[in-house]
Image (spheres, rainbow, N blue to C red):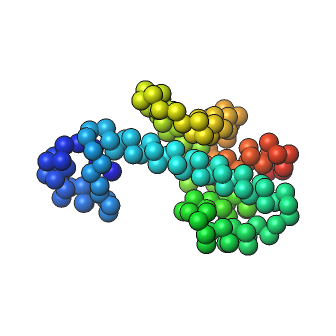
Amino acid sequence: MVGGEATDFEAAQEVLNGVGKTIVHVGPSGSGQTVKAANQLIVAGNIQLLAESVVFLEAYGVDTDAALKVLGGGLAGSKVLDQKGQKMLDRNFDPGFRLALHNKDMGIVTAAAREAGVTIPLGAVVAQLVSALVARGDGGLDHSGLFKLANELSGGDKK
């Protein structure tokens, strides 16, 4: 995702292709950062909803391995489910992308949304949940650690 003038993007194409596989011009200067922020908003929301779904499934004694397989084959399927679902089931929050970094990114998203006059109610809630985890000392965990808080708020284990 690259922002800038189209002519500058074309002129830099050879260099850009040397540092990445999927190079897309997304608009004027600053647009790349905006697309990155939107990505973090989507990822955080998906991780939070996956965490809540796992807590929900466990509360009913469902075979969660089987359930995630079924969910992954339908419209609920996503890279987030594929990459973070098993980590939640295993209570393995070894960092891939740390909550502290996601907290920084969610701050960028919420500030940018405010600046643009755009409301992001679900994103704001997830941003606060991420911030709460960081504030209590879990910033070094993978962002799938959102499961810990969702589980604890439902009275689950505190692993």
Task: Give percent across and percent down for residue 73.
Answer: 61, 72
Q: Is residue 39 above or below residue 29?
A: below
Task: Give percent across and percent down for residue 110.
Answer: 51, 32
Task: Give percent across and percent down for residue 20.
Answer: 31, 59
> Which residue is painted at 82% across and 46% down in the image?
154
> Which residue is painted at 49% across and 39% down in the image?
105
Taking 7 as reference, is 16 left or right?
right
Question: Would residue 103 be visible to someone looking at this image?
Answer: no
- Residue in the foreground of this view, choosing between 96 and 56: 56
Question: Would residue 10 be visible to someone looking at this image?
Answer: yes
> Which residue is painted at 52% across and 44% down in the image?
41
Q: Is residue 116 above or below residue 56?
A: above
Taking 73 as reference, is 117 left or right?
left
- Residue in the foreground of this view, choosing between 36 and 145: 36
Q: How many marks?
A: 0
Q: Is residue 74 above or below residue 17?
A: below
Taking 54 as reference, is 2 left or right?
left
- Residue in the foreground of this view, choosing between 89 and 113: 113
Q: Is residue 25 above or below residue 136?
A: below
> Which residue is painted at 25% across and 40% down in the image?
28
Task: Give percent across and percent down for residue 104.
Answer: 51, 36
Taking 29 as reference, is 49 left or right?
right
